[in-house]
Image: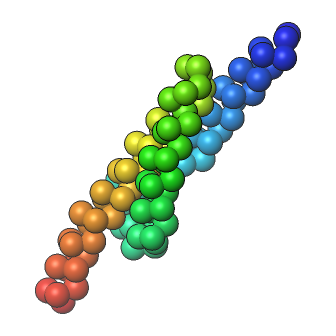
């Protein structure tokens, strides 16, 4: 296997591992709608970082990094949107109790 082939396989394996590590967090957020433990500053910074990183990724040839970055963009944006949406639900629930 050539150096490029090894790099491609390593990229594919790391993409699957990183995406798999984030999936339980996303599934739990969908299931419970409880994102109180997430820092809003972290969620915003992750999205800003992903936006800046897009400039780099779009200049790379298509490959595993595109899928991994797309996954990070999607999950980070969803987590921020869910945090904003469900925060108002939590606030309303606290006001009613």
Residue displayed at 25% across by 76% down: 90
* Horizontal and vertical percent position of residue 77: 37, 50
Give above or below for 39 relative to 79.
below
Give above or below for 85 relative to 12.
below
Q: Nearer the viewer, residue 92 or 51?
A: 51
Residue displayed at 58% across by 41% down: 20
Q: Nearer the viewer, residue 31 or 65?
A: 65
* Horizontal and vertical percent position of residue 69: 52, 37
Is residue 67 visible in this depiction of the protein? no
Query: Which image quadrant for residue 4?
Result: top right
Is residue 80 visible in this depiction of the protein? yes
Residue displayed at 62% across by 34% down: 15
Q: Nearer the viewer, residue 47 or 12?
A: 47
Give the left or right position of residue 30, taking residue 28 as reference: left
Q: How many marks?
A: 0
Q: Nearer the viewer, residue 43 or 92?
A: 43
* Horizontal and vertical percent position of residue 26: 44, 51
Give above or below for 64 relative to 49.
above
Q: Quadrant of the N terminus?
A: top right
């Amino acid at each position: 296997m050539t150096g490029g082939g090894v790099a491609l396989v390593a990229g594919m394996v790391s993409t699957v591992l990183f995406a798999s590590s984030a999936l339980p967090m996303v599934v739990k957020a969908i299931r419970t709608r409880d994102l109180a433990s997430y820092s809003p500053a972290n969620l915003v910074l992750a999205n800003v970082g992903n936006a800046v990183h897009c400039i780099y990724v779009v200049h790379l040839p298509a490959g595993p990094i595109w899928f991994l970055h797309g996954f990070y963009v999607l999950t980070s944006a969803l987590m921020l949107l869910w945090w904003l949406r469900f925060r108002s639900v939590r606030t309303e629930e606290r006001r009613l109790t």
